[in-house]
Amino acid sequence: MIRVSLPRLGRIRTHESTIKLSGRIQTGRARILSATVRYERGRWFVAFQVETAREMSRVSHPDTAVGIDLGVKHLAVLADSSGQTRYEPNPEHLDGVLKLLRFHSRRVSRRQGPDRRTGRKPSRRWEKANRERNKVHHRVANLRADALHKFTTRVRAEYGTVVLEDLNVAGMLRNRRLARRVADAGFGEIRRQLIYKGRRNLCTTIVANRWSPTSKTCSDCGAVKAKLPLHVRVFTCDTCGLVLDRDENAARNLLALAANCTTGTGVAGDQDTPRVSKPREADRKTRRQRPGRGGRAGGASLPHQRQKETGDRRQDTEARHAPR
Ligand SMILES: [Zn+2]
C-alpha cells in the first residue's frame, strides 16, 4: 500500500512505501499516535508518531569507547579505546555548489521580485528563477541530511560509548568567519542524532563540559597549554614532546573522559555506573510491554523520565571535569 488516509484530507498517495508500517499495524505491533503534515522545500511530508516495540540492534564493539572531535577541516576525528584513529572527511556539500548558487542568485536578483513596501507581485520569470535556485539549496540539504544520518548510524552501530564535546554551535554561527562552514557541517545535528541513536541501543553518550580544555591538553601526559591558536594544526607538547594532529589530540582527550566516567578508579565512577544502567534496564522492559497496553499516560511519561536521566548524567560529567 502506498497510500495514507488523513482526516479531512482523505486518501493521499505517497512516494515512499508504507508497507512496513501498515504491516506492523495490521499485526498489532504498532499503534499510530498522531500524524504531522508539513511542507518542506517544495514537498509535502507526513510523519507518524508510532508506538512500537523496537528491535535492539547489536553494537559491534559494546566495550569500546570513542572520542569524537568535530571540526571543519575534517568533519570528525574518531579516536577509540582500541587505539585506532579515523578521520571522517568533510563532504563540504555547500562548497561544491557555491558557484552554481552565485549564478542562480544573480539571475534571480535581475528579475522583478516581490516588494513588500510597494506591494509589487513577483514576475513569473522571477518565480521560475527562484524555484531553480531553491532546488540547489534543497539538494544540498538532502545530501547533508543523508551523509549525517549515515555517519551517526555507523558510529552508533560500532561503539558502546561515545564522548562528544559540548560545542557552542549557536555562538559559532554568530562568527561570520565560521558560520557558513559550521552550518554546512551540521555540528548540532550530529550531536542530536548521536544522542538519540545511542539511546535507542541503550548505549552511553557522554557530553564533555564546554569549558574543559580538550584541544589544549596533552593527551599523553596531561599538561595544559596556556594558548593554542586555531591556525596551529599540530599539537606539540612542551613537557613530554608529543607531536600529534591537533584534532586527534582533542579526540584522545575526549576518549579519556569516557574512561573516567565508566571504569573510573575513584569511588565516583563505581557509584555512577549502576545508577545509570539500572533505569535503562527498566526502560527497556517497559518499552517492550507497551504495545499491549492501552492509554497514553504511561507512554507520555517515559520520554520525560529518560530526558531527566540524561540530564543528570550530563551534569555529573560536567561536575567531575570542572576542576580540571
Ligand atoms: Zn605531553
Image (cartoon, helix red, strand yellow):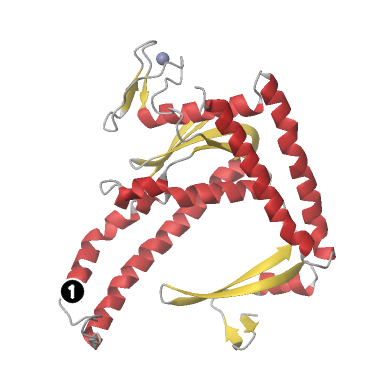
Q: Residue 266, how many percent across, how many down?
A: 66, 18
Q: Quadrant of ligand 1?
A: top left
The residue depicted at 54 percent of the width and 51 percent of the height is: 193
**Image quadrant where one finds the N terminus:** bottom right
Tell me which amino acid carries mark 1. Ser
**96 vs 69: above or below:** below
Please state the total of marks drawn on the protein image: 1
**Looking at the image, is 87 positioned above or below residue 134?**
above
According to the image, label 1 marks what residue? Answer: 109
Looking at the image, residue 262 sits to the left or right of residue 76; the answer is: right
Question: Where is residue 132, by image quadrant?
Answer: bottom left
Question: In the shown orientation, is residue 200 left or right of residue 163?
Answer: right
Q: Residue at the location (45% across, 76% down)?
A: 43
As rendered, which of 237 and 151 lies closer to the eye? 237
Residue at 51% across, 54% down: 149
Image coordinates for residue 280, horizontal then vertical, percent: 74, 44
**Image location of residue 59, percent across then percent down:** 65, 42
Q: Residue at x 48, y 49 (%)?
A: 190
* Residue 129 appears anywhere in the view: yes
